[in-house]
Amino acid sequence: MNRRAESGKLPQRRKFTSRPLHAIHCAGPERIQKLLARHGLGSRREIEQWIRAGRVRVNGAPAQLGGCIGPGDVVEVDGRRLRLLREEKARPYRVLAYHKPVGEVCSRDDPRGRPTVFARLPRLARGRWIAVGRLDINTSGLLLFTTDGDLANRLMHPRTGVEREYAVRVRGEVTPEMLARLRRGVMLEDGEAAFVRIVHAGGRGSNHWYHVVLREGRKREVRRLWESQGLQVSRLIRVRYGPVALPRGLRAGHWRELDEREKRALIETTKG
């Protein structure tokens, strides 16, 4: 997901292919950012940034944030036209569970030429894969992808409080007082944070494994929480996102598509 850079500049414009953008099907009027996200053009937050930057037009006029569009409207994104058509049935969407290895980045294009998680995903005839959250280059484990930007937004939004579970190997002496502080909450540079649950999972000497749970996804939050206690994270693996666990036997760099039952469970999780 694109974010404003520290300098305050807007994200780089998407490089659309030369072929015309596909038609958008909808059953009736719907908020523009929600509809375009649902069809995989980007996450809802990303499309909101496009609207603020004047990159989206509706029937020849600049789009308004929160405005509704429906069948018959013509939408342009960076000058490329989308046509809205009536559709009675819900558009199908896909969700992948990907086992991210250490060494891959979560951006689509890396200026340093490092391998990206998107390179291993199956090609789509329409829309695009949207990552549900991010994992840093040194973190491995479960990363979800979907073609539904609105679902991705709901899964990531702090309001829904979807659980993220990690297996973490910590180097250093962990005391009961430290664990109590991490459960109660500590102040980080971007606000207070705490683990919902911490469970010891074994280890010896100065290296011990813990399973920890968060209900938000701030940058390097797991690592920063342990570092606030003077401890070092030597290995970090995401093992669960909401009801979806890292599939057993799924090798690093491989993916598995979720079935309808698993997708329904994801949607139910976002209803809080």
Image: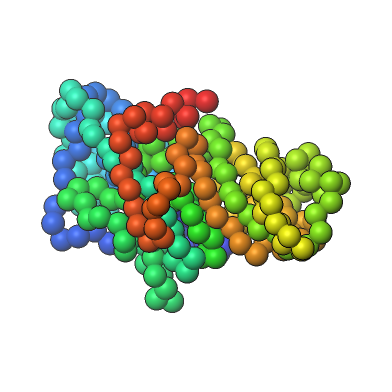
From what the image shows, is residue 139 above or below residue 212? Answer: below
In depth, the one of 9 and 153 nearer the eye is 153
Which residue: 51% across, 43% down?
Answer: 240
Q: Is residue 78 left or right of residue 52?
A: left
Quick one: which residue is furthest to the bottom in this view?
Answer: 112
Q: Residue 98, how many percent across, how many down?
A: 39, 52
Q: Nearer the viewer, residue 128 or 201?
A: 201
**Taking the image as drawn, is residue 47 in sight?**
no
Q: Give the quadrant of residue 113.
A: bottom left
**Which one is nearer the viewer's eye here, 13 or 120?**
120
Image location (x, y in percent) of residue 29:
27, 25
Q: Residue at x 19, y 25 (%)?
A: 89
Q: How is the image coloured?
A: rainbow
Q: Position of residue 49 (x, y in %)?
A: 42, 48
Which residue is depicted at the point 35% across and 33% down?
263
Query: Residue 100 is drawn in which quadrant?
Result: bottom left
Tag count: 0
Choose between 96 and 128: the one closer to the eye: 96
Residue at image location 54% in from the left, 65% down from the top: 138
Q: Is the residue 180 above or below the residue 261 in the image? A: below
Left or right placement of residue 212 versus residue 159 in this view: right
Q: State left or right for residue 187 relative to residue 32.
A: right
Question: Can see residue 265?
Answer: yes
Q: Position of residue 221 (x, y in %)?
A: 64, 52
